[in-house]
Image (tube, helix red, strand yellow):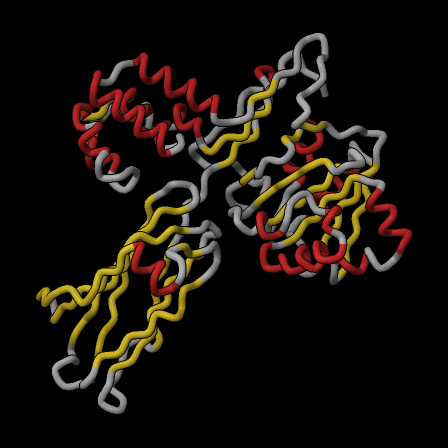
Amino acid sequence: MKRNIFILLIAVSILFVFSTSVFASETIDVKDYIKGKFPIMFNIYLASLEGLDQYEKEFIDLLQNLPEEEQKNFAKEVYNNGFSKEILAKIKDALLLNVPLFLEGAVGEKLPEKSFTWDEREGAIIITAGNRVKGWVEFVKELRKVLHVSGWGSRSLLDFTENERDLERMRNSHTVFMIRPENLEELEKLEAKHPDLLPLSCSKLKSYSFPLLYFSRDDNKKIRGVIITDGVTPLLAKSLTEDALLLNVPLFLEGAVGEKLPEKSFTWDEREGAIIITAVKTANIEISFDPDPVHCENDCLDWRVIISETKGVGVNLKTIVADVYVGDNYIGNDFTINEAEMNEVWGTPYLSAFSSMDDFNCRWCPCEGNTGITIKYKVTGIDDNGRQVEATADLELMD
């Protein structure tokens, strides 16, 4: 598995440089292109770009993948000095500094401590429980072409720890737990009794978006891994055995793990090295109501606003706005709640992945004069990957 130069690069769609959008010949107004991607101040920082050419669009695509503070620094540099290809080159270098990059030279130097390559002579156990991950059997079969792998499956992960011989075998082997997101409680039960078998605490694992791969090495030099996803393919198994794995780093993949890579990513020719590419997931927030629509009862209109995240990425909510309309006519603002007020009322403005805020109760009394009204809600926030997200929904107040 050694190559003259081996590159393992875990990126978050930094390779947009080669996407078709980069090479489009038409110009686009900078304000339209960056809308919803950066804070409003960036309209000023990047105003000099005006009609974007292919290099300027490439710069903005890459800028999205930097930490917020570095985004500001590059944007201010454009504001102060104007855009140039030198700035484009600098941002590409900055992106490479923000992802792990490891090399193995021609003479076969050891890989860095924070990476791992499977040894064909060592055993590994792939363990699943509950509603099994789609493609699990084919995944294990592919691993067996290279490694001595045992595939264990049961209703509960704890079933394997009750037998002392099985538990001892797990401790003396590399182990990977493969679980669907809805079965995370299985990992929590395992952590309560045998935390050393997991690569990371469940609370930390749950803070990441899914699908997720995470591997670490325990005190006995054994690999402890988890794959949290709804589905895997033989392609992923092949990648895990052919390429070195990063340790103690969350690896994200879009869609069913191992499926075709997202449209805005690519894989180098094998002669140039191997790359595992991941796409950043963007949170999705939705607004719903209970009941919907609202009818007058006991001379009052009562309803509950429910704000949910459905894509597996946490969101820091920024504003909740409710505007009142009669037909198409704007009547006024019922309320606007900011981040500080959310923290005061609910204890936090943060909406965890796959969670809902459902204790937002509203009441209008009396019904007279308050029916035939539409309340237009809008929620905004910044997700864990730095993307701006928003949701809107209308609620009808009926007689």
Residue 99 versus residue 151 in the image, above or below: above
Residue that lies at the very extreme toward the right in this rendered image: 165
Q: Residue at x 66, y 11 (%)?
A: 105
Viewer-side residue, 46 vs 54: 46
Query: Is residue 95 positioned above or below 365 on the image?
Result: above
Q: Where is residue 110 shown, x and y percent of the image?
A: 72, 17
- Residue located at (71% from left, 57% from top): 192
Residue placed furthest toward the bottom = 298
Q: Position of residue 44 (x, y in %)?
A: 18, 31
Check the picture and name the quadrant holding the N terminus: top right
Side of 4 where 311 appears, left or right: left
From the viewer's perspective, is residue 233 above or below residue 5? Answer: below
Apparent side of residue 99 relative to residue 103 in the rendered image (left or right)? left
Report the side of 108 relative to 298 (left or right): right
Q: Nearer the viewer, residue 231 or 127?
A: 127
Q: Residue 310, relative to residue 9: is it above or below? A: below
Q: Position of residue 15 (x, y in %)?
A: 44, 26
Q: Quadrant of the C terminus?
A: bottom left
Direction top: furthest residue: 107
Depth check, front residue: 128 or 24: 128
Quarter-of-image position of residue 302 = bottom left
